[in-house]
Image (cartoon, coloured by chain):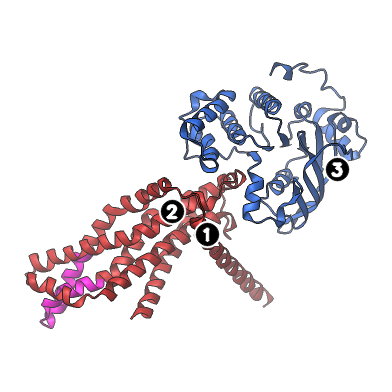
Chain colours: A red, B blue
Amino acid sequence: MLKIFETLGNHTLYYLNQAGRMGIFLGGSVIAFFMPPYKIWPMVRQLQFIGARSMFVILFTGAFTGMVLGLQGYYTLRKFGSESVLGSAVALSLIRELGPVLTALMVIGRAGSAICAEIGIMRNSEQIDALECMAIDPYKYLMVPKFVACVISLPLLTFLFDLVGIFGGYLIGVKLLGVNEGAYFESMKSSVVWADIEMGLIKSLVFGVLVFWINSAKGYYLHLERAGGFGAEGVSRTTTSAVVLSSVSVLVWDYLISAIKL
Amino acid sequence: MTEKTDDHVAIELIDVEKSFGRQTVLKKINLKIHEGKTTVIVGASGQGKSVILKHMLGLVKPDAGRVLVFDQELGRLNRNELKKIRTQFGVLFQNAALFDSLTVYDNVALPLRERTKMHEEEIRSNVMEKLGLMDLQAAEKKFPAQISGGMQKRVGLARALIMNPKIVFFDEPTTGLDAHKSNEIYRLFFRTQNQLKYTAVIVSHDVPKIFKLSDFVALLAEGVIQGCMTPEEFQLSEHPLITQFVEETMGPIYSSEKDEEGFYAKA
């Protein structure tokens, strides 16, 4: 009986600890962002890695998501004889939900895991300690460029995703299934309002912070992982848990933001 | 314990205690590091020598006790003050801790790039000078994984010295190197310290070689510094743990004058 309480207490303490250091980590990154010196070049390089290099995967997933929305939407809407609002259905689901969420998930898979592994390995081989001993702030040197790159590139990638998705829906709906072209775009124009775009933008910004935050912090605190952050296996285990945690958080926050905004 | 009152104290540990989980590593550490001198901390493996070093670097906080660096208590400093103190540090880590995704050149240049406003040409001449001192110009464009362990240590040393630090910490500078390579590291150490006059703190178990380089030797055993004295006093000490350590590591006869005489004069 006592053992149950002990385990429960240990778990609670561990998660409280983790929550605390995650908070400290985000605070530290934000503070470091505002501290001089401001170096552009490292940010550009991270933007290239996290943003530009994710473009292909985003184009691809965006196109197919739009296409499948066009396909499914068409057959559902046809039952009610309202194929003409297909454009609105595709655009709204992309801009409000699927665009930000799927973009974030793709970036987590491609760049988030890389961020966590990179920082985790640096932690494991004392490279982060070495930075600190050289009086180089690891937040400033390692985190800020990634932070900025995530927050800038996620909205842009989401925008790209939406655009390509709408075009994919157009290809299937209009070109393949014969929905009226004018109706496709007209329904879109009349139903998508600024609030929808704003919601998508807010989501993608929040997801940008989440992707950076969870993956970097997991790597940075690798040595404090309960399962042990030692060696190659420690890095792989932590990267896995970072990817899972950040993906789940993206979905949870997606719901929360939708619930608040609607 | 021998005290030289005319010396300035660079680092002082007062009653430092540290446990990891249920394991007590440091029981009560009292140690003074004198400015401009070389202090070697010796002791069997796993006694917590590196932990002492990490306390001096401010990477680990003591459970109890105080760590003073240039009369400032590390535990009471905020991030920026700690950073300021660390600008005077140079550290050679046990595994060199080079940035493995940067080239040798970039590794050594990093502190200059991040902490000074030097132009790239100035940085280049500084870095190449240090690399030259370590006989590493040829490896400039290689990555740490492409060079040998001894070379990595030399790169680490070049990086530690690039900002002309006041205190340089060496965590097992020669572990894992053969006799020839470790002599080379010692020669480099001797030469650079003569040139730059830094305070050195060395953690090592390369006894007796390390004695010749040191001004003070401190033995860590059973979680306590058993004595900090000159190498000569250390070897003649009657403290049971020190005698035991000396006998275990270098045999009962004091012989370091005879072997390799004039070795460091070559440097």
Dot 2: within a 10 Å radius of its alpha carbon, few (fewer than 14), some, or many (20 or more) residues?
many
> What residue did someone put label 3 on?
B226
Label 3: chain letter: B
Type of amino acid at the residue the image marks with label 3: Gln
Label 2: chain letter: A
Label 1: chain letter: A
Q: Secondary structure at mark 1?
A: helix
> What residue did someone put label 1 on?
A31
Give the residue displayed 66% in from the left and 31% down from the top.
B174
Type of amino acid at the residue the image marks with label 2: Lys
Q: CA distance from mark 3 to mark 1?
A: 44 Å
- Residue A222 falls within the magenta-colored stretch: no
Kindly identify which numbered label has been placed on residue A146: 2
Q: Tag 1 or tag 2, which sits nearer the N-term?
A: 1
Q: Quadrant of the C terminus of chain A?
A: bottom left
Q: Are marks 3 and 1 on the same chain?
A: no
